Image (spheres, helix red, strand yellow):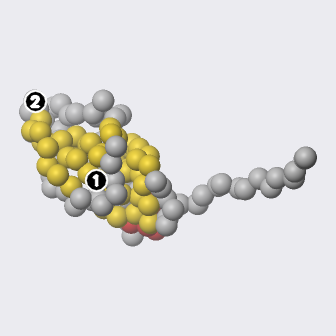
Amino acid sequence: MWGIYKLVDLACVFSLDAALGAKNVYVDCWKYAGNGIAYALYTQDGSTQGYVARLDLNARTATRVELPYEEGLDFGQYQGILVSGDDVYIALTPVGKDGNIYVINRQTGGVTKGAKLVNKAGNHYIGIF
């Protein structure tokens, strides 16, 4: 038996400016973590200062993740957010300074401070692979 199927338009309009209440949000890197949740590394207002946001694509909302955002945190060349099960791993190191890996629970949004990352002057981590 032949059926007629209607294609659903899956286009989604999602403004991080509106969701975060910020201006000129620029996404340096993002990763889908599953069940409608994604994480984005971003800057705003033309600055290079980096931040992390948890995006709920189903509800079309976003919130800044509470992390120790030091001056000089720049995600400009960031390439790799790692997702393993419910855990999302992000390296958070300002340019030329030591930092940490942070583990974020995809379902709850809870944050755990992980391993220390030792850095050298002028360098920064570009991801976790």
Residue visible at 87% across and 53% down? 4
Horizontal side of 89 relative to 117 (left or right) equals: right
Q: Which amino acid does label 2 sit on?
A: Lys
Secondary structure of the residue carrying numbered label 2: loop
Q: Circle 2 is placed at which residue position?
A: 120
Percent of width and height locating residue 88: 30, 45
Front residue of 18 and 58: 58
Q: Which amino acid does label 1 sit on?
A: Asn
Q: Distance between the residues labelled 1 and 2?
A: 29 Å
The disc, 1 or 2, on the residue closer to the chain's N-terminal end is 1
Horizontal side of 107 relative to 116 (left or right) equals: right
Which of the image's four quarters has the C terminus?
A: top left
Percent of width and height locating residue 36: 47, 55
Q: Residue 32: give its label.
A: none
Q: In which quarter of the image is residue 85?
A: top left
Q: In which quarter of the image is residue 46?
A: bottom left
Secondary structure of the residue carrying numbered label 1: strand
Front residue of 42 and 100: 100
Percent of width and height locating residue 86: 33, 48
Residue visible at 14% across and 49% down? 113
Taking the view exactly as shown, the residue that stands out farthest to the right is 1
Q: What is the crowding at mark 1: few (fewer than 14 residues within 10 Å), some, or many (at least 20)?
A: some
How many marks do you count on the picture? 2
Q: Circle 1 is placed at which residue position?
A: 105
Q: Nearer the viewer, mark 1 or mark 2?
A: 1
Q: Are marks 1 and 2 in contact (CB under 8 Å)?
A: no
Front residue of 117 and 88: 88
Q: Can residue 29 be seen in this view?
A: yes
Percent of width and height locating residue 89: 27, 42
Q: What is the crowding at mark 2: few (fewer than 14 residues within 10 Å), some, or many (at least 20)?
A: few
